[in-house]
Image: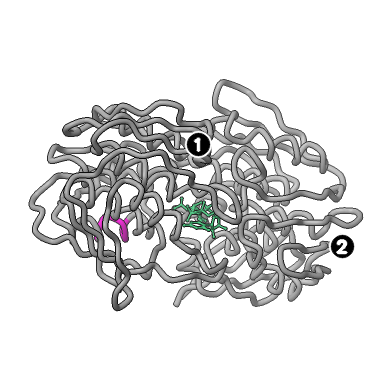
Amino acid sequence: MQKIVIQGQNKLTGSAKINGSKNSILPMIAASLLTSDEVVLEDVPQLRDIVTMTRIVEDLGLSTTYDKDTRELKIKFENEENVTAQYDLVKQMRASICVLGPLLAKRGRAVVSLPGGCVIGPRPIDLHLLGLKALGADIRIQHGYIQARAKGLRSGTIHLLGTFGSSVLATGNVMMAACLAQGQTIIRSAACEPEVVDLANFLNTMGARIEGHGSSEITITGVKELHGTRYRVIPDRIEAGTFLMAAVASEGDVVLKNVKIEHLGLLIDRLKTVGARIDVTKKNEIHVTRSGSLKSIDFTTLPYPGFPTDLQAQFMALLSTAEGSSVITEKVYPDRFMHASELMRMGADITMETGMAVVRGVEYLSGANVMASDLRASAALIIAGLMARGKTEIDRVYHIDRGYETIDRRLAAMGALITRED
Ligand code: EPZ
């Protein structure tokens, strides 16, 4: 079991290049099941979640090769014998549910293990199943598996609105399936996240006919088949937001390259409010500095373009030493506060109830032994470690490697005293 060790209070300087988006790439790997041609994805980072998804599609008859130099992922069709996504792989990563739509559309049959919950919440899939049933799929749940079959999907009008708002991966799943369904499908209350837009753009380069992506109403006109493509994914806005907050936390002076400013608008606005200085230097570079104390701020997580739930933990860490109190309302995953108890071990003053946390700023955090519980909580603990006085040791580092490529080495290259130890 590896851990990350940080000596706090070193400023980050220099620059970092943001990688291709994990949450774009995962559904695109699943979408490769929709064609018998080769698919090439560009700017693909080496992440555990991406390896897991390639294993799942390999199990389903595709072959994949990753080139470390070009950072390209090549995916090729081999056979369509197996239509079952096994529990031992699916349980590792919720996004595996995205193979359901493509398998149904291309092969007319799918057996996918129920993904199960994770520490940030129950993670239901009712909207995925509702959407695919609306396209004519026959779906049953037996022995922990989704047994789905469809003799040719038909179009439909689908409302994909859950208790907590729209669903990113359910929108992706239904959109992928509708590409090969007969007729015109309309998805209402569709998710507007940039990764959904990226997936739609990717599918359109394969010959799909999708319009309205980025709005809450997406129209998909079914086609006979999809051909291969070569596609460069958008930069990872959550990685960019994490690096921005790490720079602010360390009172550093950093330039981030390969970012899409329009995907970070709200975060940039909030970071300026709390005291960071942020300039957009070129079309896709951000210069961020911070001197002087941080101010507190209230914020609520919401589906895009609201504040991203995937940056809530990182922002809580940053605000733990701001002047005053910050009220954090978590509307997407009300239980997503596992990181708070670890921050409190470092001296943060946080009170919580379901869906809400109040962070009272303290003068400083002190380094401690803490434990990562999930991907974004790990990032919050790294940010806290950069700010804290003394040494912080973060256990269960495999969580961070799911979504951030060699983050310790990249931060060390910017001046952080951070190492990885067995
Ligand atoms: C995607 O998960 C992301 N994962 C998550 O990022 C992100 O937190 C989430 O969207 C919200 O932005 C990937 O893209 C791989 P949702 P997804 O369906 O699609 C409820 C990370 O750190 N819901 O948009 O699974 C659900 O409980 C990960 O990279 C239903 O009720 O999330 C939640 O409250 C963590 N029924 C809300 O919708 C459903 O069928 C939004 O979830 C599906 C979801």
Q: Mark 1 falls on what kind of element?
A: helix
Quick one: label 1 or label 2, which is nearer the N terminus?
Answer: 1
Q: At label 2, which amino acid type do we have? A: Arg
List x then y, in percent, for residue 174: 36, 45
Residue type beneath disc 1:
Pro
Residue at x 78% of width, y 55% of height: 319
- Give how far apart the Cα atoms at labels 1 and 2 are: 33 Å
On screen, residue 67 above or below 50: above
Give whichever of 376, 188 is nearer the camera.
Answer: 188
Judge whether residue 229 is colored magenta: no
Q: Is residue 53 magenta?
A: yes
Q: Is residue 107 above or below residue 37?
A: below
The reply to whether callout 1 and callout 2 are in contact (CB within 8 Å) is no
Q: Which residues are magenta?
A: 51-55
Quadrant the N terminus occupies = bottom left
Q: Which residue is mark 2?
A: 360
Q: Residue at x 74, y 56 (%)?
A: 329
Q: Which quarter of the figure has residue 73?
A: top left
Image location of residue 71, percent across then percent down: 31, 41
Q: Position of residue 345 (x, y in %)?
A: 74, 76
- The structure's colour scheme is one colour
Above or below, 232 against 406 in this view is above
Residue at 35% of width from left, 31% of height from top? 220
State the image coordinates of residue 125 (x, y, percent, origin top left). Answer: 44, 60
Q: Determine which residue is flagged by label 1.
A: 194
Q: Magenta region, mostly helix, strand or loop?
A: helix
Residue found farthest to the top:
283
